[in-house]
Image (cartoon, rainbow, N blue to C red):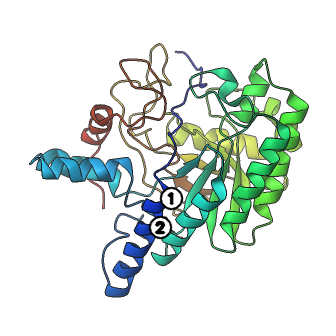
Amino acid sequence: MSQSPSRRARPRPRFPLSRVVLTAVLLLGAAATGGTAAAGAAPGSAPLFWVDPDSAAARQAAEWRAEGRLGDARIIDRIAQRPQAVWLNEDGPGAVVRAHVGAAAMAERTPVFVAYFIPYRDCGAYSSGGALDAAHYRQWIDDFASGLGATDAYVIVEPDAVAHMVAGCEGADAAERYELLAHAVERLKSRPNTKVYLDAGNAGWIPEEQRLVAPLRSAGIDTADGFALNVSNFHTNEDSLEYGHRLADALGGGKHFVIDSSRNGNGPYDGDESWCNPPGRALGTPSTTDTGDPALDAYLWIKRPGESDGTCRGGPRAGRWWPQYALGLAQRTPDRP
């Protein structure tokens, strides 16, 4: 089975800032009247994570209801009504982060963000792009951090960035990349209520976890709250948990971690390009901090289910909403409380 993870649908730019501000106003009204704008947050969790009421899945459900496709709309609600991360992958992140933080605070929920703008992103593959150079990235991450303020938030730092270097990515300077990641972690952790997790790949990418130790340390893991695993991938919770404990032990110091469980309900695909829009997959454990494991801080839907991994298997460009694939993920997933 191919283990290549360099893969991902990186969500296209989030919706316009004006729409985010309008959403914040609507959420404030709902909170004041006891409305259900935050429905779908993981029950029994502390904190409860924010549900984006204007996600692509939510808009799709509304469109299908208007067309009379009520059954499909109810199924896609299995995605729309769950907390998912907000990806920042373009210039000017501060204002967007600030608006989402405000909307989440009004709903008394905690937002999850992904910083995804490292130079030579995705090693030039499907989700290539990012900052033009090191100075551009430092300015970008400083702007990102300024938007967080003192409100509770989780941030996943640069999916793939460390594991790509360990796997032999050509075209990026390792020393510079690790310095930029360490800067990102330091700036984000300067916010008083932000939890920061540095991405560490997945259980099938760098099997010898010891190879990640020195790079993660160079990239600021000692300052971060922990590391993130399985972002945009499909490895099971069990495999990710076992790998996470091994990596935490190798790092020492009792590091914690989070697992992306957005699309791992049926585990990984046993075939070529197992990372890219694989068939037969299902949604996984909804976002929650009730993990039953003291080292695992949360299961999170970091990848937004239904956004394409790239132009494989008939999919649209990486990060584009693909309603047919989203519907399949949701159809294979039982209703959860």
Q: Secondary structure at mark 1?
A: helix
The residue that disc 2 covers is 21
- Toward which corner of the image does residue 19 lie, by quadrant? bottom left
Q: Residues within 10 Å of mark 2 (few under 14, many from 20)?
A: some
Q: As rendered, which of 93 and 123 lies closer to the eye?
A: 93
Viewer can see residue 219: no
The label shown at residue 17 is: 1
| Pointer 2 with pointer 1, Cβ within 8 A | yes
Residue 164 against residue 270 in the figure, above or below: below
Please tell me whether mark 2 sits on a helix, a strand or a loop.
Answer: helix
Left or right, residue 94 beside residue 119: left
Of residues 249 and 230, which is closer to you in this image? 230
Note whether 56 is above or below 311 in the view shown.
below
Query: Badge 1 local density, few (<14 within 10 Å), some, or many (20+)?
Result: some
Measure the C-alpha gap from mark 2 to mark 1: 6 Å
Q: Where is residue 80 shown, x and y percent of the image? A: 33, 53
Q: Position of residue 295 (x, y in %)?
A: 67, 56
List x then y, in percent, for residue 222: 85, 53
Q: Residue at x 85, y 42 (%)?
A: 135
Name the residue: 82% across, 40% down: 216
269, above or below 319, in the image:
above
Res. 93 in view: yes
